[in-house]
Image: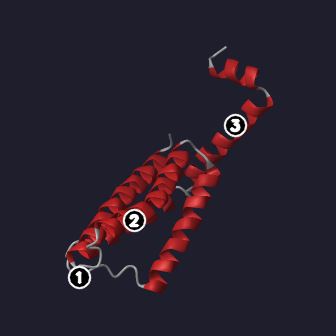
């Protein structure tokens, strides 16, 4: 794997796990403020963000496998997410937890920088190479498998 892609994916993982920490801190602070005191509403809120987490995890795994469409989808999804956060004020976390804003900023920054690494020229070569090998496999699977095996 190309170094820029590896760095980018590692930063995406850091951003992903930082986001999970932020979600837990956010729900914990809402429950401590009495907003999510009802356990049913707390569980419902957690279940609401679960598909979003699975979607992001799935995209990172596809990016790791060299899927160009996943790289673009991740970029577009995060641009939309940041725009929504800016206009709705979601970057303003609960004031009960001192580290919320710092962790949120660090996780977002890691995701942003990781995405930039995925769009460097050498990273583009990685994603194009993956696409080329996929097309070769679709067109002639026997020849490609024999070539990959060293025959």
Of residues 32 and 24, the one nearer the viewer is: 32
Quick check: 32 above or below 24?
A: below
Residue 106 on image: x %, y %: 32, 67
Residue that extends furthest to the right in the rendered view of this protein: 139
Q: Which residue is mark 3?
A: 134
Left or right: 14 as drawn, with respect to 125: left
Label whose residue precedes the other's in the sequence (3 or 1): 1
Q: Which residue is mark 2?
A: 44
Q: Residue at x 45, y 53 (%)?
A: 8
Cα distance between the residues tagged 2 and 3: 40 Å
Cα distance between the residues tagged 3 and 1: 49 Å
Q: Which residue is mark 1?
A: 95
| 2 or 3: mark nearer the eye | 2
Residue 47 on image: x %, y %: 42, 60
Residue 103 on image: x %, y %: 28, 68
Residue 47 numbered tag: none
Instruction: Tell me if residue 92 can be seen.
Output: yes
Label whose residue precedes the other's in the sequence (2 or 3): 2
Label 2: element kind: helix
Left or right: 42 as drawn, with respect to 126: left
- Crowding around mark 1 (Cα neighbors within 10 Å: few <14, some 14 to 19, many 20+) is few
Here the colouring is secondary structure
Quick check: 8 above or below 36?
A: above
**For the residues bearing labels 3 and 1, Cβ distance under 8 angstroms:** no
Q: Residue at x 35, y 63 (%)?
A: 43
| 1 or 2: mark nearer the eye | 2
Q: Quadrant of residue 92?
A: bottom left
- Crowding around mark 2 (Cα neighbors within 10 Å: few <14, some 14 to 19, many 20+) is few
């Amino acid at each position: 794997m190309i170094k820029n892609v590896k760095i980018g994916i590692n930063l995406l993982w850091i951003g992903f796990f930082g986001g999970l920490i932020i979600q837990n801190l956010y729900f914990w602070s809402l429950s401590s403020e009495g907003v999510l005191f009802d356990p049913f509403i707390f569980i419902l809120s957690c279940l609401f963000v679960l598909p979003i987490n699975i979607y992001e995890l799935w995209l990172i795994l596809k990016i790791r496998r060299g899927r160009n469409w996943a790289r673009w989808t991740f970029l577009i999804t995060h641009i939309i997410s940041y725009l929504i956060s800016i206009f709705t004020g979601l970057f303003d976390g609960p004031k009960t937890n001192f580290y919320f804003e710092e962790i949120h900023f660090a996780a977002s920054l890691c995701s942003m920088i990781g995405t930039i690494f995925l769009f460097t020229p050498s990273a583009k070569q990685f994603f194009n190479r993956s696409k080329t090998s996929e097309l070769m496999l679709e067109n002639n699977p026997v020849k490609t498998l024999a070539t990959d095996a060293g025959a």
